Amino acid sequence: MDVELRQLRCLVAIVDEGTFTDAAIALDVSQAAVSRTLASLERSLGVRLLRRTSREVTPTAAGLRVLAHARRVLGEVGELVRAATSDHTSLRIGYAWSAVGRHTAAFQRRWAAAHPETDLHLVRVNTATAGLAEGSCELAVVRRPLGDDRRFDTAIVGLERRLCALAADDPLARRRSVRLADLGDRTLLVDRRTGTTTADLWPPDARPATEETHDVDDWLNVIAGGRRIGMTAESTAHQYPRPGVVYRPVRDAEPIAVRLAWWRDDPHPATPAAVELLTQLYRDG
């Protein structure tokens, strides 16, 4: 059984326009072509879709069911076409936990002013490539290397401090900063898929216990309850302030490189402009 898009468009046009004549005008074909196309769709499906009288055309029960699916299919095809042809009119940038921290609002505003022809959309996707490999975005903000994956190119746009996330009533929260050694006897919440923190930051004989999490809201809720601590990039503190949670710099931990990633063989035309603007924002502080 082969059902073609032109058949579905024909059915929708007949119902929406109310007559075969008006459907033919809307589709810019002859009335005879509309009749033949509908008849071929009914033969393919083996059901009658429309009741036609001298006054009106109305869907049958089967026609109503097919009509609902037809509208959905045509809508999805429209989205497919827009996604495939919108390279120059929109730019989706994925991120896992936080976008670009305190620079996020400035990035959006400056982009809109400098590139009004390209709509910018920030998309949160909690995967290792922040939605890039999944097709959810054209660029991705990532805070750990993508390894040997040759599908992607990356550029470092800035550096961020590592912060420790603690319950507000934690004894360490009274300090202005902490050291890695202060955290070795705690249990650390980590996201192994997208996070920047592992026990390898500590010496082998002083590593904290770890517990896995996969969502920033869950991470914050557990930390606020005082049972666990976290370590994260400073962008998280800007994007996710939370009552009951405080962030303190870890002064002897290496900073985190913020990278912009894209498909090596299919870069978005706006990639260089995005790299340049983000690099400038991080450089200017």
Image: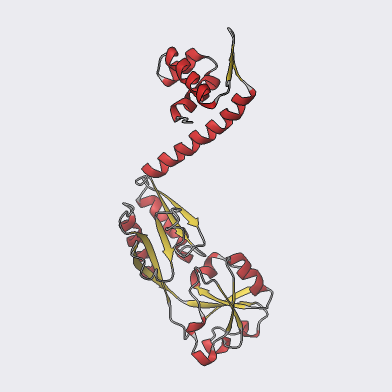
Residue toward you, 42 or 77: 42
Q: Position of residue 28 (x, y in %)?
A: 40, 19
Q: Position of residue 282 (x, y in %)?
A: 39, 68
Q: Position of residue 202 (x, y in %)?
A: 50, 87
Q: How many marks?
A: 0
156 with respect to 16 (left or right): left
Residue toward you, 71 or 230: 71
| Residue at horizontal 47 percent and vertical 25 percent from the top | 7
Q: Is residue 5 visible?
A: yes
- Identify whether 161 is placed above or below 77: below
- Identify whether 95 is placed above or below 268: below
265 with respect to 47 (left or right): left
Q: Quadrant of the C terminus?
A: bottom left
- Identify whether 68 is placed above or below 191: above
230 with respect to 78 (left or right): right
Q: Residue furthest top?
A: 54
Picture quadrant of residue 190:
bottom right
| Residue at horizontal 49 percent and vertical 39 percent from the top | 76
| Residue at horizontal 54 percent and vertical 91 percent from the top | 206
| Residue at horizontal 54 percent and vertical 22 percent from the top | 16
84 with respect to 193 (left or right): left
Colour pattern of the rendering: secondary structure
Residue toward you, 79 or 107: 79
Q: Is residue 285 visible?
A: no
Q: Residue furthest bottom?
A: 205
